[in-house]
């Protein structure tokens, strides 16, 4: 199919009609009969929660990422909370993260009473800037939470080297980057702890769900404890002599953050399809890259050669100097075309909660200015080829309409 010529013809025919008749969301799950059967068979088993599927799922994720341990949680945010707890973060401790992320990457620090320090991003990749981290580090800094924005891993070698030099713990928020590689190595075994989310828009889903992978036995044990009320039956961990077979101890203030066997069963089935999911995401991203290269008014997402993105999101940047309108008009025009565009993200420090804590506009100027121009286009494995060509058509149509005359 020659996209260029069919575009021109269709645009001419459509005139004022939207490119699509039905709305195309920006992200969605892919569930097949195999997934459904896995959940049904677990429903018929003796275990709905805390059964064999959780350990099986954890083992599969550990194997896939190359990590030694994995601990599943009821969602990615709970998993991040667990990681920050395991890292021993408490009141008075500072944790550095990026403002160009979902609020959960910062909130997890607040849950443990820690202070969030935002380090600005590199404009091209929108990942955290190691030079800004160096500027923001103090004697109270205990950890760094980098985010692999859109699926492209952050500068992990530089981050790990810096963290080792100052005794900091790195918790990688890899909610976007299941299956991504960094210098040939899979994300999940590089940082001290790595978090993946299984929300339906992410690479694989368990409905709600998340996991921490780690190579550290100490972190692993603390994560297990935290996930289930802080209670253990492990004889090696008890403070007192076991009074009998029923005996358990609550060692810390944990939560009930467990995932169910039903969800884990879905996760196992979903993970078995990860390679085809990744391939499909990469194919569509490549198609977008080719279609938008050289199109006036749009900048395609910059990718570094030494890492392979898992393409959770496809985020373009609008070159507003070349357009007659702002990002808002482009966003609304694409919604009119039934293309489910989105914006990832409103910089976290600009949310009223963080403003109330004293954070102000101006602390991360790069993130703040990037935010003004970004637009997320639909990208997920269950999109058809036609869906992806509709996105391309709609973007070209809207940009052509609003392009500034030279
Ligand atoms: C999705 C996401 C999370 C939170 O995951 P949930 O499973 O929705 O709690 C955290 N950080 C980032 C960057 C995310 O995209």
Image (cartoon, rainbow, N blue to C red):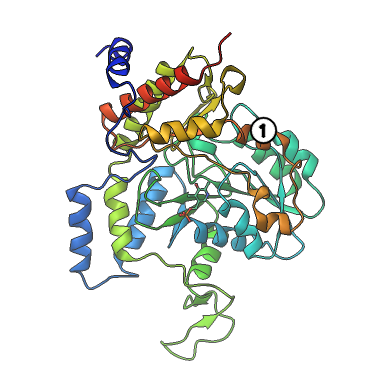
Report the number of discs: 1
Q: Dot 1 lies on which element?
A: helix
Residue that label 1 marks = 369
Q: Is residue 364 shown above or below 224?
A: above
Residue positioned 32% across, 18% down in the render: 11
Residue positioned 27% across, 34% down in the render: 21
Residue furthest bottom as drawn: 243
Q: State yes or no: Cβ of the residue under disc 1 lies below 8 Å from any atom of ligand 1.
A: no
Question: Residue 270 appears at what percent x and percent y?
Answer: 29, 48
Q: Is residue 97 shown above or below 186?
A: below
Q: Is residue 231 shown above or below 120?
A: below
Left or right position of 46 against 312: left
Residue furthest front as drawn: 16
Question: Residue 231 appears at what percent x and percent y?
Answer: 51, 77
The residue nearer to you, when weighing 159 against 136, is 136
Left or right position of 214 against 129: left
- Split into 4 quadrants, where in the image is the N terminus? top left
The quarter of the displayed image where residue 64 is located: top left
The quarter of the displayed image where residue 259 is located: bottom left
Residue furthest right as drawn: 139
Residue 378 seen by the camera: no
- Split into 4 quadrants, where in the image is the C terminus? top right
Left or right position of 126 against 310: right
Question: Residue 235 appears at what percent x and percent y?
Answer: 49, 78
Residue positioned 58% across, 17% down in the render: 322
Q: Is residue 377 shown above or below 217?
A: above
Residue positioned 47% across, 42% down in the render: 176
Residue 278 seen by the camera: yes
Q: Residues within 10 Å of mark 1 (few under 14, many from 20)?
A: few
Question: Residue 298 appears at what percent x and percent y?
Answer: 52, 21
The residue nearer to you, when weighing 362 against 131, is 362
């Amino acid at each position: 199919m020659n996209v260029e010529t069919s575009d021109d013809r269709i645009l001419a025919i459509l005139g004022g009609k939207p490119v699509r008749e039905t709305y195309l969301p920006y992200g969605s799950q892919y569930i097949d009969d195999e997934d459904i059967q896995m959940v049904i068979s677990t429903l018929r088993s003796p275990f709905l929660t805390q059964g064999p599927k959780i350990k099986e799922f954890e083992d599969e994720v550990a194997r896939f990422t190359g990590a030694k341990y994995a601990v599943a949680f009821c969602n990615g945010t709970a998993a991040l909370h667990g990681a920050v707890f395991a890292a021993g973060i408490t009141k008075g401790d500072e944790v550095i993260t990026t403002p160009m992320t979902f609020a959960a990457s910062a909130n997890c620090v607040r849950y443990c009473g820690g202070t969030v320090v935002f380090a600005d991003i590199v404009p091209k990749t929108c990942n955290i800037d190691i030079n800004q981290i160096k500027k923001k580090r103090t004697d109270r800094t205990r950890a760094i939470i980098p985010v692999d924005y859109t699926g492209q891993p952050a500068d992990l070698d530089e981050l790990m080297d810096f963290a080792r030099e100052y005794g900091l713990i790195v918790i990688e928020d890899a909610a976007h980057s299941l299956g991504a590689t960094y210098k040939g190595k899979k994300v999940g075994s590089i940082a001290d702890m790595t978090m993946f989310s299984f929300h339906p828009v992410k690479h694989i889903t368990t409905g709600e769900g998340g996991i921490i992978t780690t190579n550290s036995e100490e972190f692993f044990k603390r994560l297990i404890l935290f996930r289930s009320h802080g209670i253990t039956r492990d004889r090696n961990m008890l403070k007192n002599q076991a009074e009998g077979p029923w005996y358990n101890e609550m060692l810390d203030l944990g939560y009930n953050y467990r995932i169910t066997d039903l969800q884990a069963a879905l996760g196992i089935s979903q993970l078995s399809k990860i390679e085809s999911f990744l391939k499909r995401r990469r194919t569509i991203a490549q198609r977008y890259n080719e279609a938008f290269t050289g199109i006036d008014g749009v900048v395609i997402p910059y990718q570094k050669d030494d890492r392979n993105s898992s393409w959770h999101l496809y985020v373009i940047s609008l070159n507003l100097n070349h357009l007659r309108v702002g990002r808002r008009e482009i966003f609304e025009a694409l919604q009119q075309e039934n293309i489910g565009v989105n914006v990832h993200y409103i910089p976290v420090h600009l949310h009223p909660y963080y403003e109330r804590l004293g954070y102000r506009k101006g602390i991360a100027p790069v993130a703040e200015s990037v935010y003004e121009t970004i637009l997320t286009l639909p990208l997920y494995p269950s999109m058809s080829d036609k869906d992806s060509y509709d996105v391309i058509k709609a973007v070209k149509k809207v940009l052509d309409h609003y392009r500034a005359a030279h």
